[in-house]
Image (cartoon, rainbow, N blue to C red):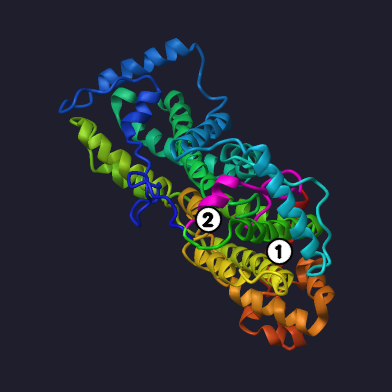
Amino acid sequence: MADRPHDDEGEQGPDDPFGGLNLPLEQLFAQLGIPMPHEGEPLDMSALLASLQSVMARSGQAMTTDGGKVNWDFAKDMARKVVASLGPDPTPSSRQRHDIADSVHLAELWLNDATVFPAVTAPPAAWSRAEWVENTMSTWQSMVEPIVSTIASSLGEVMGQRMGDEPELAGMQQMFQPMLQQSASSMFGVQFGQALGKLATEVVSATDVAMPLTGRPQVALLPTNLAAFGDGLDLDERDVVLYLSLREAARQRLFADVGWLGPQLVAFVQHYAREITVDISALEESFDEYGPEGVSVEDLAQLGDKMRRSLFAPQRTPEQTQILGRLETLLALVEGWVDDVVAQATIRFMPAAGPLAETVRRRRAAGGPAEQVFASLVGLELRPRRSRDAANLWAALRADRGVEGRDAVWQHPDSMPSARDLDDPLGFVSGDSGSGHDDLDAELAKLLDEEGKG
């Protein structure tokens, strides 16, 4: 597989949870229309107060109604600009659309004997990267929106407390806090747009992140990214497109026929996001290093860097750890099932399937397309680490019960294998693994099931 493109300036390092995005604190004030001092000059608190009053006079109203809300149209526009900056993104040609339609048609024929789930009815599609952003934006928004209020309120709380300690700013908290919340939301929106734009250059299909991201089941592939996937593989381009069409079509069949699966995956992410807690003490310590007077532009830049590290590297709670384990197991089961189905569909017809399957495994082991975006946005290390174990479990089920018996396990979430079953797939097949969920898992599953129905 060709190496994924890297942007040295935007590359996320181990100590940079914000994904390399440079948003110092002075930009936050600039968003409010507050001029900053020249380099080397201290921040004048009296001038800050005057600027605040000027901002309020220009606005003519209290900035409270939209505090903490992300402008998602702006975030989407940011994602599309990132896409445009990372290479050509042509609209798929009529020839590419025709080739993908033919590839998907053949893939569906092969899959008919490999799974009982029927093909989706929507015609296959070829998308540009920008079209992928447009078509998946609403689902991404629903998953990450719970984070926004936590981040915005945390920043507003700390800044409000600091202002309350300054005599010159006494009584200004109620006026200033909504503006800070809005600025924090804007920072998150920029970060989200950047992460989504980068992800759009890596995914090869609509469900490449192992989650349903569109409003309706539809097999969709990205020709530009398919070509990049095949670079350096020394395989026929048609085999590459056909193999990835098989994986996409299999996932779409699964999500379309197993009604609880997609909502459950999304609900897990939403629940994880709602449990995020920002380390308020870390933010306060960042402010405590600087006094109310004599804060230079350089100090403000350092403060802004510490703030964004605190905001976008939230603390993980025990409940989040439980949710993460359930989510990663379910994602592994999805990808493992796809591995087994596609292996059976190609075993008689496609010699190149073996090398392509190994390429997919290496890509997944290095960090799938979804991992970077979830890690930078919610600190969620989203990786189906045990997909190979899951594939072995599904293969054992198929050998023992046939294709129908294997796919029947998806009928209800209570019948799904647990993480323990991945350690003992033969025990799960024979019914001797004792795979019942404990009380915490059962209560969590019930909660998420209710959220998914909602």
Q: Position of residue 433 (x, y in %)?
A: 70, 86
Q: Who's the residue at 51% across and 51% down the image? A: 228
Task: Name the front one of labels 2 and 1.
Answer: 2
Q: Is residue 178 above or below residue 249?
A: above
Depth check, front residue: 371 or 351? 351
Res. 92 in view: yes
CA neighbours of label 1 inside 10 A, class few (<14), some (14 to 19), many (20+): many
Residue 115: x %, y % from top left: 80, 68
Do the residues under discs 2 and 1 have CB atoms within 8 angstroms? Answer: no
Residue 76, given in percent of the width and then of the height, sits at 55, 34
Residue ID at (66%, 39%):
135
- Numbered badge on residue 82: none
Name the residue nearer the viewer: 163 or 360: 360
Image: 24 above or below 387:
above
Determine which residue is flagged by label 1.
445
The quarter of the picture where residue 58 lies is top left
Q: Is residue 227 inside the magenta stretch? A: yes
Q: Is residue 318 above or below residue 121?
A: below
Pick the front one: 85 or 152:
85
- Residue 279 magenta-drawn? no
Please, what secondary structure does the residue beneath circle 2 have? helix
Res. 245 image quadrant: bottom right
Q: Position of residue 297 (x, y in %)?
A: 22, 31
Identify the residue under disc 2. 229
Element at badge 1?
helix
Q: Kindly report the distance in space between the C-alpha atoms of the residues bearing marks 2 and 1.
A: 36 Å
Query: Disc 1 marks which amino acid?
Result: Ala
Nearer to us in this view, 6 or 172: 6
**Above or below — where is 187 with respect to 268?**
above
Q: Residue at x 61, y 41 (%)?
A: 132
Which stretch did the figure color magenta? Answer: 209-231
